[in-house]
């Protein structure tokens, strides 16, 4: 791969096609999942999945391959989706991790998982802390 168009090398060895495959397989699971499926269904129209998957694939290609092809704000989106709760994140990560393990070589899956867990921690903190009442003690 030619990295001359990016400021930094990728975080780990993965191809854009592998990222796309993980996103496609993951969202196939999400759509039928009884826990987070309804949350996604409330925000992604039935005919909007291809567009959503492409946007999320751009997010991951930006985060991993540093493509600079994603211009969204995940924290803002998760905060605006009032039905996204902190307790959804462990289940999301479980589905994501099982997808990674099934679709990628072990070292690549582990690296991708570590990044996903780090990002999810930040999003979960934002969802829980920024929505907490002003007099609530901070979460640890």
Image: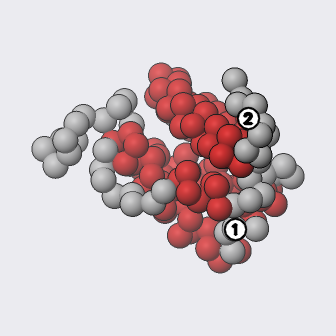
What residue sits 71% from the left and 49% below the top? Answer: 131
In percent of width and height, residue 5 lies at 16, 49
The foreground one among 28 and 117 is 117
**Quick one: label 2 or label 1, which is nearer the N terminus?**
1
Q: Quadrant of the C terminus?
A: top right
Instruction: Report helix, strand or loop for mark 1.
Output: loop
Question: Is residue 13 rendered to the left or right of residue 5?
Answer: right
Q: Which residue is mark 2?
A: 90
The foreground one among 4 and 133 is 133
Is there CB contact under 8 Å for labels 2 and 1? Answer: no
Instruction: Report helix, strand or loop for mark 2.
Output: helix
Whether residue 95 appears in this view of the structure is: no
What residue sits 45% from the left and 47% below the top? Answer: 60
Q: Which residue is mark 1?
A: 43
For this orientation, the residue located farthest to the left is 4
Asked where in the image residue 95 lies, by quadrant, the reply is top right
Q: Quadrant of the N terminus?
A: top left
């Amino acid at each position: 791969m030619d990295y001359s168009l990016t400021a930094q090398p990728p975080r780990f060895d993965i191809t854009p096609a592998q990222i796309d495959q993980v996103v496609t397989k993951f969202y196939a699971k999400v759509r039928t999942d009884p826990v987070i499926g309804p949350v996604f269904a409330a925000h992604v129209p039935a005919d909007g999945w291809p567009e959503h998957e492409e946007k999320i694939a751009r997010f991951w290609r930006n985060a991993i391959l540093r493509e600079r092809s994603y211009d969204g704000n995940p924290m803002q989106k998760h905060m605006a989706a009032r039905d996204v709760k902190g307790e959804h994140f462990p289940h999301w990560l479980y589905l994501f991790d099982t997808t990674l393990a099934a679709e990628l070589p072990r070292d690549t899956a582990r690296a991708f998982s570590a990044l996903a867990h780090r990002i999810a921690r930040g999003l979960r903190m934002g969802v829980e802390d920024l929505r907490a009442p002003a007099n609530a003690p901070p979460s640890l």
